Every structure is written in C-alpha cells, then in structure tokens.
Image (spheres, rainbow, N blue to C red):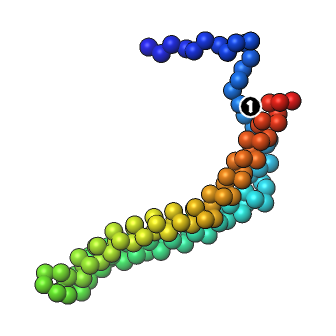
Amino acid sequence: MAIDAPPPEGGRDTSPAQPTTEEFVEEQESAEFGELRRSYRSFAFPLTVAFIAWYLLYVLLSNYAGGFMGTKLFGNINVAFVFGLAQFATTFLIAWFYARHAADKLDPKAEAIKSRMERTEATEADA
C-alpha cells in the first residue's frame, strides 16, 4: 500500500506547468518540427523498405530457388547459410547506422524543441 507524500509547505503546487494543447499544435506545425520529421522519415522509410525487400528476397529464394540456396560454397556452408547470417549482420548494421543518424541529426533538433517547450512551461509558471 503506497502512502501519499504530504502536500508541499505553503499549499503550493510545485509540479512544472504543462504546455497547452495549442502550444503543442503550434510546435507540431513549426518548420523546425517539420525538419525533424523529414530527417527521420528520409532515413527510416528507405532503409525499412530496403531491409524488407532484402528479407523477402531471402524468403523467396529459400522457397523457390532451393538449388541455388543449397549451393555449397565451402565445406558444409551453403548460400542459404551465408544469406541467413547476412540477415543478422544487416539488422545490426542498420541499428548502428540509425543510432549514428539519430545522434548526429535527430537528437540535437529534438533537444532544441524540448528545451523550447520546457522554457515555455517555465515562463508560464513564473507568470
């Protein structure tokens, strides 16, 4: 059973003010927010489509090109095994590329928007 903390002294609410719906909509319609969305979409959508196409190629070749996928490259290693390992490699590579892209391009823009919204909250709370 959780016990509520006592109210702050003076009976004043010390929680930060929240932006209004209008402020959120205004921010969403801003050029800076639009640029953030474009940066994200121009990276995420093409990479997602490329990865899905690569994965479907692997599945389709596995189903309909058994002879090709069964071709031994060396020892007991065949084309299907190499393609399967490449699926894992590309997954990690895409995650790494995204992390770099987010750190370089998305995070600074998002942080600027966040700090502006928090600053708006702080100035309204002081008023």
Asked whether 40 or 66 is in front, the reply is: 40
Q: Quadrant of the C terminus?
A: top right
For disc 1, the marked residue is 17
**Residue 86 appears in view:** yes
Quarter of the image for residue 43 reads: bottom right
Q: Quadrant of the N terminus?
A: top left
Above or below 6: residue 78: below
Above or below 100: residue 127: above
Q: Dot 1 lies on which element?
A: loop
Q: Position of residue 28 (x, y in %)?
A: 74, 51
Q: Residue at x 67, y 65 (%)?
A: 38
Q: Position of residue 15 (x, y in %)?
A: 69, 26
Quarter of the image for residue 72 reads: bottom left
In the picture, measured across the screen, residue 40 lies left or right of residue 56, that is right
In the picture, measured across the screen, residue 18 lies left or right of residue 88, that is right
In the picture, measured across the screen, residue 25 lies left or right of residue 102, that is right
**Residue furthest toward the right?**
127
Q: Amino acid at mark 1?
A: Ala
Q: Residue at x 46, y 66 (%)?
A: 96
**Residue 41 appears in view:** no
Q: Position of residue 105 (x, y in %)?
A: 63, 65
Total of numbered circles in the picture? 1
Q: Residue at x 53, y 66 (%)?
A: 100
**Residue furthest toward the left?**
75
Q: Residue at x 65, y 13 (%)?
A: 7
Q: Residues within 10 Å of mark 1 (few under 14, many from 20)?
A: some
